[in-house]
Amino acid sequence: MTAQTSMLHIRVDDDIKEQATQALTAMGMSVSDAVRLFLRRVVIDQAFPLELKVPNAETLAAMEESRAMMAKRRARFTSADELFANLEKNSSK
């Protein structure tokens, strides 16, 4: 005997849906498969299957910087050398 199923409707940003669909397809899964897997983990673990944290001030600043850069469609560094120089300079922090 097969289990009775229900339809689940959710609203998701079009870009996120497309990107998730592409990533999941590369993993051999559909969005529906991923949602079913997510819900199974909730039932099995009786917990949210991802670690959720409130970001600290440094992370919040990085997130805001990233959003601003994405809105402007520009890179923070003009070259890979500049990026690596910045990473080396800040690696001792």
Image (cartoon, grey):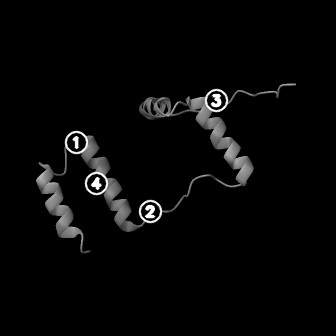
Separation of residues labelled 3 and 4 (CA atoms): 33 Å
Q: Residues within 10 Å of mark 3 (few under 14, many from 20)?
A: few
User: Disc 2 versus disc 4: distance between alpha carbons?
Assistant: 14 Å
Q: Which residue is mark 1?
A: 72
Please count the marks in the image.
4
Q: Amino acid at mark 4?
A: Glu
- The answer to whether marks 1 and 4 mark residues whose Cβ atoms lie closer than 8 Å is no
Q: Nearer the viewer, residue 17 or 44?
A: 44
Say whether marks 2 and 4 touch (CB < 8 Å): no
Q: Which residue in the structure is indicated by mark 3?
A: 9
Residue tagged 4? 65
Lower position in the chain sequence, tag 2 or tag 4: 2
Q: Earlier in the sequence, mark 3 or mark 4?
A: 3
The residue that appears at 15% across and 50% down in the rendered structure is: 80
Q: Residue at x 17, y 62 (%)?
A: 86
Amino acid marked by disc 3: His
* Mark 1 / mark 4, whichever is N-terminal: 4
What residue is at 59 percent from the left and 36 percent from the top? 34
In the image, is 46 to the left or to the right of 86?
right
Q: Tell me which amino acid carries mark 2.
A: Pro
- Depicted 74 relative to depicted 22: above or below: below
Q: Residue visible at 27% across and 42% down?
A: 71
Q: Are marks 1 and 3 in contact (CB under 8 Å)?
A: no
